[in-house]
Image (tube, coloured by chain):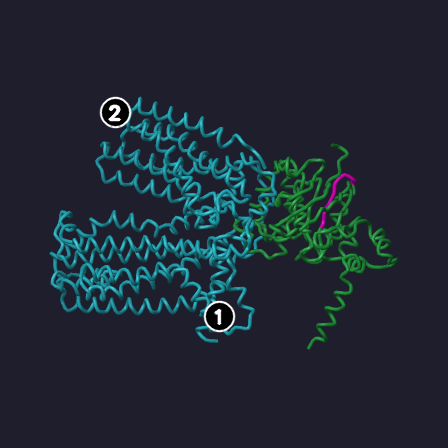
Chain colours: A green, B cyan
Amino acid sequence: MATAPPLSIGELTVRYGERVAVDRLSFTVGPGEIYGLLGSNGAGKTSTIKSVVGLVRPAGGTVRVFGRDVTVDGLRVKEQVGYVPETSLLYDALTPREFLEFVSSVRHLDRSVASERTASYVRAFRLEGEFEEPILTLSYGTRQKVLLIAALLHQPPLLVLDEPLNSLDPRSVRIMKELLVRYVAGGERGVLFSTHTMEVAEQLCHRVGILDRGVLRGEGTLEALREKVAAGDATLEEVFLRLTEEGEGVRAAVDSLGAPG
Amino acid sequence: MSWRDAVRLSDVAFTELSLQAIYALRQGNLGPPEPAERMVPRARRRVVQSKAIVSFVLGLLAFAVAYALHESRTVASAFPFAVPPGVFDAGLLTGLLSLDVAFLWWTGMQVLPTFLSSGVLPVLEPLPIDDTTLSRVAGLLYLRLFDLPALTVVLATPLLVGFALGPWAGLAVVPGVVAAVGFALALSLLTGRFFVRRVQGSRGGGGRALVRWIYLVLWLVPAFALFGFVTAAPAFFDFLSHLSVEGPSTGSHLLLAAFPFPLAALPAIASNGAGGFGLDPLGWLVLGGATAGYLLLAVWAFVWVLESVRRMSIVPPAAARPVRPARLDLVPRPVVLAVLTKDLRIASRTPGFAFLVLLPILDAVAIGLWTYVTASGSAAASNLAFAAVTTAALLATFFGPAFFAIEVFAFAYGRTLPIADRSLLGGKVLLVALMYLTASAIVLGITLARVFDPAVFALFILAELPGVVAASLLELGILFRRARRRGMPVTNLYAGAWYAIFVSVPGLIVAAVPLLAFQVARIHGSPLGLTVMGAAALAELALAAPFALGRDGS
């Protein structure tokens, strides 16, 4: 158990009725690693993440967090995971304080630890002014900050972040990027990170997996992926378009649109 | 754009509103595990069903009053004072119109938070639609929340009154029902705006939470309209009797000016003549002026509602000034208490859920207050106090399952937190027990002054507690099994509201058994009654606990 990786996904299949959203997907997030899951809309990123946090029951395959099967030992897995969902649909009737109090209770945090960490994050994200306002009244960016704090509060050994930087202001994006790098620096924790933004993935992720219509088209470091598509100095965006065979499609789409105006 | 375009747009918007009202997806609920194309028709069907239930109640009220009007001589003879036939009919119709306003207002208060939080109208705002059409769409959308109940009032009441008192009376009640509907729509919108500003957007903190709960108690006032009407009816008819004997007076003129009496008097006069009312020229003037005034006010209310809905639905809640809190510390609690606190905090900003918590308490308190119309220390006072606690136990058991629908809020997020079913269940059971104990403690406090035997009464409350907990555990045990099997919140409307009602049947039986055991055994003295009651309640708890807590999971 001690040597088990933070996250190990094997032959994962997710179905919604007849539609296959994820098709026999396998990858691992190692200790000390930020793993980026890249893909177009509907590629299967969120379905994969939902399988990890127990929101979707896989039709096949396994999802293990530090060796524990999500479908068998769900409660223990949830204790080890911090999760930021794609949409910030929270308890709208609670204030950030009330929400974080609930989360810290559920996570069995000591009062002083919970307060100390909350105060640090709230100050870092400049949330003091909104701390007692109902979440309903907060902007999307502010809600996203509240979600990030909730995910980090118990310093989980695995962070699962679904488009976590969406709606954040540039300052907060920078803080999050640096925070994530430090978060895994100890070499034990892992981060699974989904994004559309290639620049962010390129800067932040040790390895990336490129999903296309539920299938993993490529996986590895940027260098390894460049080698795979035989493009020595290509950006991650170019590698992505080649692997998903969307390069031609993009050109054709732009041509069909013509010049604006 | 024309009215036709507005109707077409409001139809699309109403579909979205129905979807949000039933599935609460914008409040963080997970969609049901079924094809999307089934969700829309099901949501529309459920909304129509909800409106049909309210309409049925309103129709039933109109029928009951029409029947009483038809049999007014027999009904009037039940009162110990003489009221002229026309005035008696006006009194009954005053009650009916007041209840119509109260029920429609209450309906509005229940649906308005969903209407405002659905975000349907703000979606239309950036589209190239002119202001007039947008206002019309908003107005039509709001009217559609009330269509079936309002039509029931406007159509069924004149028909039934016409059947009971004759066609002219049926026609003469039309201004009354139009005014009732107009005022109810306006009151719903006004109180809705108040809710958005003062309750939904209220900042955190203990003091503010207390103020919110006080507002929410006020919010519940219309729900007690029927109770108030039944309680006040004898005094009201006594007052009418005095006025009719007294003849024209300041009191009778004030009554003729007070809503909805003048509008209720019209059909009574159309049927019986004005003889019983003893109207002097000033009385006729007041009656005519008040009728015209209320009708004009109702028309203005309709216009105001149509013009204001759009503005109100796009105004964000709470205009509180940002204040830097002095402290950023958190107070984590044991998980069971955290669940309870979270639910109460959500309920304090969500009237629909606050209603379910407060109603058993307020209902028990209202019955407890009745002990003050009985002789101090009498058996009647004692029985009323027991009845109040019994009501609290049964209503807490009945409303519990509906309250658990609070889990739909942020369900998709909440499910990712490591909360064991046992802790979640514990929090919910604790809430039901708290509702019962709060109501009982207040009743005990109120009735102490009536001094019958507070020790026996306190033991009665404690002896029933395991029964209430057992009932709640049984209901939750059933709900949890179903919810986990289908991967959805503990209760949700799309699971069928009937399911929450269905599970409350065995719950009510379990809660009632110790109460019945007490009633049977107390013939041989209160100590035996309490012993049997406590034993029955504990036995139920011993059976229900393993059923509910036996299977733990994630």
- Reading the image, the residue beneath label 1 is B134
Name the kind of residue labelled 2 in the image.
Ile
Considering every residue shown, the one lying at the far front of the view is A18
B84 left or right, relative to B174: left
- Report the number of numbered marks: 2
Q: Secondary structure at mark 2?
A: helix
CB atoms of marks 2 and 1 within 8 Å: no
- The quadrant in which the C terminus of chain B is found is top right
Residue B78 place in picture, x, y as percent: 15, 47
Q: Residues within 10 Å of mark 2 (few under 14, many from 20)?
A: few
Query: In the rendered structure, does residue B138 fall within the stretch colored magenta?
Result: no
Question: Residues in magenta?
Answer: A186-193
- Nearer-N-terminus badge (2/1): 1
Give the camera-side residue of A45 and A192. A45
At a point 79% along the width and 40% down the height, the residue shown is: A187
Q: CA distance from mark 2 to mark 1?
A: 68 Å
A21 left or right, relative to B93: right
- Snapshot quadrant of residue B183: bottom left
Q: Is residue B550 visible?
A: yes
Q: Are marks 2 and 1 on the same chain?
A: yes
Q: Secondary structure at mark 1?
A: helix
- Reading the image, the residue beneath label 2 is B523
Give the camera-side residue of A23 and B449. A23
B424 left or right, relative to B299: right
Residue B170 place in picture, x, y as percent: 22, 64
At a point 25% along the width and 25% down the height, the residue shown is: B523
Query: The disc numbered 2 marks a residue on which chain?
Result: B
**Relative vertical location of residue A181 with respect to residue B277 in this rendering, above or below:** above
Considering every residue shown, the one lying at the far bottom of the view is A261
